[in-house]
Amino acid sequence: MAVQTAAPTTPSGTPSVDLGPAAGLSCRECGERFPLGPIFACAHCFGPLEVAYDLPAGDPEQLRKRIESGPASIWRYAPLLPVPADVADKPNLNPGWTPLVKADNLARELGVTGGLYVKDDSGNPTHSFKDRVVAQALEAARAFGFTTLSCSSTGNLAGAVGAAAARAGLRSCVFIPHDLEQGKVVMAAVYGGDLVGIEGTYDDVNRFCSELIGDPLGEGWGFVNVNLRPYYAEGSKTLAYEICEQLGWRLPDQIVVPIASGSQLTKIDKGLRELIALGLVEDRPYKIFGAQAEGCSPVSAAFKAGHDVVRPQKPDTIAKSLAIGNPADGPYVLDIARRTGGAVEDVDDARIVDAIKLLARTEGIFAETAGGVTVGVTRKLIETGALDPALTTVVLNTGDGLKTLDAVAPTTGPTTTIRPSLDAFRDAGLAH
Amino acid sequence: MAVQTAAPTTPSGTPSVDLGPAAGLSCRECGERFPLGPIFACAHCFGPLEVAYDLPAGDPEQLRKRIESGPASIWRYAPLLPVPADVADKPNLNPGWTPLVKADNLARELGVTGGLYVKDDSGNPTHSFKDRVVAQALEAARAFGFTTLSCSSTGNLAGAVGAAAARAGLRSCVFIPHDLEQGKVVMAAVYGGDLVGIEGTYDDVNRFCSELIGDPLGEGWGFVNVNLRPYYAEGSKTLAYEICEQLGWRLPDQIVVPIASGSQLTKIDKGLRELIALGLVEDRPYKIFGAQAEGCSPVSAAFKAGHDVVRPQKPDTIAKSLAIGNPADGPYVLDIARRTGGAVEDVDDARIVDAIKLLARTEGIFAETAGGVTVGVTRKLIETGALDPALTTVVLNTGDGLKTLDAVAPTTGPTTTIRPSLDAFRDAGLAH
């Protein structure tokens, strides 16, 4: 991905930037501060930029009440996000405030006694957590005067961008590999924006997008996870906020998060630390665990080897929404897992499928392969002793099984097939 | 469907029945009352039974406050539903409280000036409104001591029953035609209950289920839409409750509802009348419109012909979730449409597809074919003058486009396919 240190794509006539409590961007490596803008890398050290805030000071009880009386969406946390105060009044998909399911049946199967919860993000408008991050990018795009919302994607992100742009009345243009399966193409194209097939691999698509951002052809374009990435990424904080509020303003002891780029895990940690700093939850230890598929486990491999750097891998797994072989935030994930006393673990494709079916059978939640990864890793972490079953544990499901039917199709079918007669039914032995 | 007038399937040792405000069952034809039980037809006139209530009397403002402080699910309306007061504490999918989307972009396209809203039920746990009705049937099943939750289905209902039973820790056994498409089989089977393929048509499956209910083999079985139907059907009232509460405790002027059996439309009317009777909304006129696919439009045909009875049709439409050729509640739908000054209309498959894409393009909502029917019919009703665009209008989307990808796949694809180069992109004419 091309490093971009200035803001050449800001269209002329950009309105004054109001992104609520967002006070600027700061470099995660050297700490240098920059004004808010569509930039994502430090001009000095090329480190990644993230949003720095002037967070609301004052009585935590009042802030809790303000949040609780807010809308049933991520916008209840608008005072903690890089969005204008009136964000809920603008046309957007209003994602979030998804169920935190007390998973007692799954807990029994896994031997968890301290309380097990599934944060089920499949209820979001386009059925993945991507709606949370795209909603932030949309506000940044509006603030910077962008007229086209864009991304490269092979799945969830394409739908989230297309749907958000449609609701907001922006144009969208999404880039995909030309040979994507038809079902995924339909999900990306149905929102009516432009969808461009690129003759090449997903890496080719990304390289092309990076060129486009640096070219006058891309003027006025907000690539949600490139030039709007610092804002986009903040959306994952809302998972941390919701989990704590839904637990009664309490930190979970343990939380299991899928790793693609690693961004989500780092932002969940950031969100938890903000809640502590604001006095919204009691400060006590929590452990963050990262979950990968064995077929794309660069962070898990580095964690187990005791390394600080992540060696890229060539992905080969059914968990395609997590298949990033060179995860940008890998080193930060390693830091957080080690600092909090968590771990990073991986499971193979067979265990991913088993875990999808386990979650469906016990809790009636049909997860995407990424959900199979977190549930499968949770089970493995209990087996290895890394995760304490006596502590309160939250497992993330970030997507929807309807989008990855192929993963379970080969092993999921009718119990039996019979003639339409009571005799045939009796013989089948199911009448109990 | 076999008429059942007694309660032979009640297992021995049934606990005393606590279904909250449900006071009994009453015949919709002759008014005869029966105690709560797993029965669905009047012993005297064979008319359909429905739940009769002792609804809470008292100050509407207090009841509104009580509801508003309840959970973000249908259980906020537990005082108005046939469920025990502690229903939210029992394991269930907690469906409902789905978004009422202010559809300003769609309104512009359709010329609606009085306020257009889409009640988007695709955010339910299994992504259709069926979660609302199955949740009621589940409570009835628990109250009557049933141990197996069952249904016949070709789609949404199978998943809703499988998931609800899984969460509740009940067994499920779902019957489907043996030749269902693999994707639908996977969605029905993934929750781990028994799934039985029946060699025959969907009608054969239904006939078999009716036999099973009357046979000792079916003892302890709750068929959600047969012997639990009176309870099940009440779940659709929650759509009316939510719409009014989300409008600020106000009746919509016009509401467009899809028609399969017609039950949903009749229960929405019942829900609206209850809100008026309880003083929760101001009593003023509202119009209910029914929407069908042209390829299965028996109620629309009867409405247009001025008939009181519905002549069965053989369905042939892409809107399979609405394809009931002999809708049980058709005559009641005709009554309601005429009484309220509404209408029943139908659209052909091409207009259904267009409407799905229109809704996706304008509001970022990807609807099932049933949603294409309601949006398409809304457009047609405006064209014919039956629906007044100057009035507040609510259109229901009861399902999810991910479940009917085939409907839009032939006409939904990339704008273009190019080589990964800026020159190729410039030539494609998309850089604006």
Image: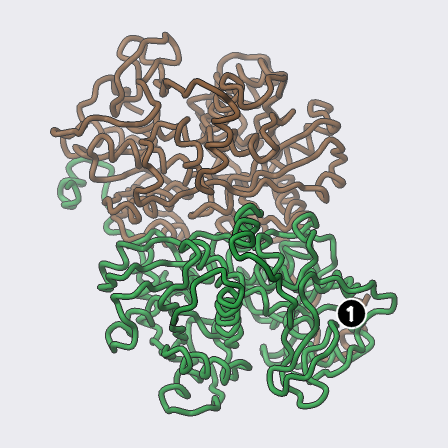
Chain colours: A green, B brown
Mark 1 residue element: helix
Q: Residue furthest front?
A: A59
Q: Residue at x 28, y 58 (%)?
A: A106
Q: Is residue A408 left or right of residue B311?
A: left
Q: Is residue B346 left or right of residue B59?
A: right
Q: Residue at x 17, y 29 (%)?
A: B15
Q: Is residue B204 visible?
A: no
Q: Nearer the viewer, residue B108 or B180?
A: B108
Q: Nearer the viewer, residue A280 or B186?
A: A280
Position of B339 relative to A116 (above/below): above
Q: Position of residue A423 (x, y in %)?
A: 15, 37
Instruction: Answer above or below: position of B191 versus A15.
Output: above
Q: Residue furthest right?
A: A13
| Residue A368 position by quadrant | bottom left
Q: Callout 1: residue from which chain?
A: B
Give, as a three-letter code, the residue at label 1: Ala
Front-lying residue, B278 or A188: B278
Q: Quadrant of residue B7?
A: top left
Q: Pointer 1: what residue?
A: B428
Is residue A387 toward the left or the right of residue A58 in the image? Answer: left
Closer to us: A117 or A147: A117
